[in-house]
Amino acid sequence: MDIFLWGVLPYIMVVILVGGSIWRYKYDQFGWTTRSSQLYESKLLRIGSPIFHFGLLAVIAGHFFGLVIPKSWTEAVGMSESLYHFNALFVGSIAGVGTLGGIIILIVRRRKTGPVFMATTKNDKLMYVVLVAAIVFGLWTTLASVFFDEHGVTYRETVSPWFRSLFIFQPDIASMAAAPFSFHIHTLVGMALFMIWPFTRLVHAFTAPLHYLFRPYIVYRTRDKGASVANRHGWSDVGTHDRDTQHR
Amino acid sequence: MRVMAQMGMVMNLDKCIGCHTCSVTCKQAWTNRAGVEYVWFNNVETRPGQGYPRRYEDQEKWKGGWELNKRGRLKLKAGGRVKKLFGLFANPIQPELKDYYEPWTYDYKTLVDAPLGDDFPVARPKSLITGKDTKITWSANWDDDLGGTEEMGHLDPIVEKVRRESEDKIKFEFEQTFMFYLPRICEHCLNPSCMASCPSGAIYKRVEDGIVLVDQDQCRGWRQCMTGCPYKKIYFNHKTGKAEKCTFCYPRIEVGLPTVCSETCVGRLRYLGLFLYDADAVTAAASVTDPQHLYQAQMDVLLDPNDPAVIKAAREQGIQEDWIDAAQKSPVYALTKVYKLALPLHPEYRTMPMVWYIPPLSPVVDLLREQGHDAEDSDVLFGAIDALRIPVEYLAELFTAGDTELVTEVLRKLAAMRAYMRGISLGNDPDESIPASVGMDGETMYEMYRLMAIAKYEERYVIPKAHAEQAHDLEEMGCSLDFDGGPGMGAMGDSPFGEASGRPTPVAVETFNALRDRQTSDSVAGADTLRGRVNLLNWDGNGAPAGLFPQHHPTEPPREGDREDALEGGGGS
């Protein structure tokens, strides 16, 4: 079971995430959007959405810090265990609570505002369940390590080495299996989130428009490119090449 | 000098009767879909009035268009690139549905299905957003014909401004003095701020004809364009989550047809044609310090298509001869630069709009007539234009960033034309002093009158087709109606070798046949003419015609060789 969960599933997840995203990018450009509901309701969105998104960015940065950077590195630059611990808990909790608070505002808004609820698809609902579960279990791991777990932060010796080992295709299953139960749940829900990611509206994150900072303000395009009736992927012209040449 | 071509429009506001035919036909053509129920690519607003969406001209609130920064360079009014990115998660200044209106329909079914009873059945209004009962409180032209009345007039941002500046010297005389209609479409600006606001770079300007479009595949729904456009002519499709805008009916323009709004205009007030402009000069022109100089700067960007240097540069840029020719005959060039009658809408937004307006003289004329004056007499008209400060100031806020002299000049020209032509119509000798008083000669004024009053279809719409050498890219070009099986061929039989033989049928011919079939038979559409395929453009939604889904072939499909033999009838290849 451990082999499947921590040795096979992560790779299945990556295949689905990457493959699914490429597939969707190729075949569903038109569906690739934020599907913003700000047109219906703006007040609550303007409170909830920035809190959620900025909180989430901080959470992502925290995950990078905790998972990718080995314990030996932070120690090498003189960061003590307790300082790291404090940092992770303090900043992590703020970011996590912010994210959760933000998404609660957004979900309440979604449920209570008629037009927004009308525009909510089943796909959205499933996505919200998994997303909220990932956030809640994530916060739980943080809180659990403060209040219930006397060993302090253990994920840097269990989850993080396993996470890094995945990239060299030698998954360190044993160390992950040794991690507390709360981390197992959070990781599994996280993987579920990444597996549904390409098929939900979450894809908008992959096209975050950072190139806006560098592109020229005015965009010119010739009619031939894109604007005209170019053939879609997987479509071919009616008729065949030989027929065209023969009739000439 | 980098010469580029731009399709432009001029609207003669004197001729607009506010019938909304342009809006309705545009809506039928482009926005009769779910998600854009509230969207009018073309709308007609009564001025003075709030417009659609409400008070869109209040840029202190909506932050549309450009402004100059401290160093005198152009900057988006809503903020720079970094600020825009921080506003991605929730656009701080985005119009909501209530700023447009909540679209609705009526529960017509009740009228038919209601059981017999004492009460009349009522078709209740239903919101198209929530599907629930709704109370209609506003629409795209709710204040139609209410321009300047007590309840609405003060809500017009321009009225507010003019009143503030005239220090309430003249109280509220708008209801007595004037009202006119302002049809609006996307301005297809030379310096579009919607485009500059788009984080994804999905909005683009076509090199060939300057039409501004949204790439529906690249748009990610960040909504910054709605804020960026000062005319609020970019709309959010709340079903697809993408931005949509007026397309200048580019599929029609490409084949030389006028836009739907122009074609169906009852007053024939719209003119379509080409401008040649210097693309390298646009940014500098839009950065002129004094907003009142923006009109002249914009005029200077437009190039004279008869100037040999311009023609040479245009050829070097690959602009075709027929396009240069069209630019020379362009009615919009004549009205803007030769006669200097047409003015841009809100040049102070610094977007260099390319839909121009001839300001209306009729408010002045109407007033004079009501007061018992001779409204066709040039002296009376000239005097009235100068005396009637409010209409002129109001028009100046709309078209010249407040420069009343420019508007007066245009109105005097229109007045002079009226008086001059009346003289001629009455059989008097032309009074050459009238055109001279506005700096024109009689011949030019007569030409101007011809273009303004009696120009025919081909003179009002000078639209060069998309380049001939690109014809093979444009499916429908060169498609003759005498195509085998087309309308010109009488009976359309199956091709001798079955459906797939011969050249593919152009879509227009296929659609023609399918439409005829649908209108003349009572079976499911497209069953026969399409020979097993489905033309979705024509499918009426009834049933699932054969060919909607691929058939399951249990046997092996014919080999390539067999088919070639059949085609060639055994002949050599």
Image (cartoon, coloured by chain):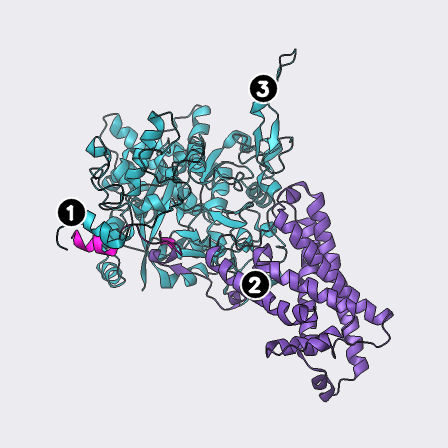
Chain colours: A purple, B cyan
The mark lying in front, picked from 1 and 3, is 1
Q: Residues within 10 Å of mark 3 (few under 14, many from 20)?
A: few
| Residue B526 image point, x, y percent | 36, 34
User: In which quadrant of the rendered image does the N terminus of chain B lie?
Assistant: bottom left
A151 or B324, nearer to the observer: A151
B484 or B99, nearer to the observer: B484
Amino acid bearing label 3: Asp
Q: Which residues are magenta?
A: A227-248
Chain of the residue displaying label 3: B
Say whether disc 1 or disc 3 marks the residue closer to the N-terminus: 3
User: In which quadrant of the rendered image does the C terminus of chain B lie?
Assistant: bottom left
* Residue bearing mark 3: B113
Chain of the residue displaying label 2: A
Q: CA distance from mark 1 to mark 3?
A: 61 Å
Q: Residue at x 37, y 33 (%)?
A: B264
Left or right, residue A161 beside residue B162: right
B265 or B524, nearer to the observer: B524
Magenta stretch containing residue A34, yes or no?
Answer: no
Mark 2 residue element: helix
| Residue A237 image point, x, y percent | 31, 52
Left or right, residue A49 beside residue B178: right
* Residue bearing mark 1: B569
Q: Residue at x 62, y 63 (%)?
A: A194
Q: In this rendering, do the residues under marks 1 and 3 share a single chain?
A: yes
Amino acid bearing label 1: Gly
* Residue bearing mark 2: A16
Marks 3 and 2 in Cβ contact (< 8 Å): no
Left or right, residue A97 beside residue B35: right
Mark 3 residue element: helix
B337 or A226, nearer to the observer: A226
Q: Residues within 10 Å of mark 2 (few under 14, many from 20)?
A: some
Q: Can residue B305 be seen in the rendering of this structure?
A: no
